[in-house]
Amino acid sequence: MVMVRVHMMEGRTTQQKAELISRLTSVVTETLAVVPDDVRVLLLEVPTDSWGIAGTPANVLRAQEGDGRP
């Protein structure tokens, strides 16, 4: 069995996450010659106030950039 763990900031749609899971599964099966039933994908969504970039929480950076995301 192969486990792929992805840490990402929250905010993606259900459709985006489903596509990511599908594509990661495909890449793993092709690259490692395993069947899809042997692939697990775990998406770990982190709140933007718990994700730091260069010493600043991501939500603060986003607010400074004015992109409207939390």
Image (tube, grey):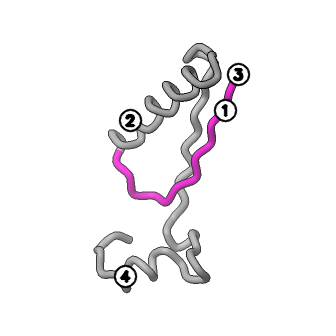
Is disc 4 in contact with disc 2, using a CB cutoff of under 8 Å?
A: no
Is disc 3 in contact with disc 1, using a CB cutoff of under 8 Å?
A: yes
Outermost residue to the right: 1
Q: Earlier in the sequence, mark 4 or mark 2?
A: 2
Q: Which kind of residue does numbered mark 3 sit on? A: Met
In terms of secondary structure, where does tag 4 sit? helix
Count the marks: how many? 4
Location of mark 1 (residue): 3
Q: Position of residue 2 (x, y in %)?
A: 68, 27
Query: Which label belongs to residue 63?
Result: 4
In the rendered image, residue 9 lying in the magenta stretch gets the answer yes
Location of mark 2 (residue): 19
Location of mark 3 (residue): 1
Q: Position of residue 20 (x, y in %)?
A: 44, 38
Q: Earlier in the sequence, mark 2 or mark 1?
A: 1
Magenta residues (range):
1-13
Per the model, the C-alpha gap separating discs 4 and 1 is: 34 Å
Measuring 58% from the left and 52% from the top, which residue is drawn there?
A: 7
Per the model, the C-alpha gap separating discs 4 and 3 is: 41 Å
Measuring 57% from the left and 21% from the top, which residue is drawn there?
A: 29
Name above or below for residue 30 compared with residue 65: above
Quadrant of the drawing holding the N terminus:
top right
Q: Earlier in the sequence, mark 4 or mark 3?
A: 3
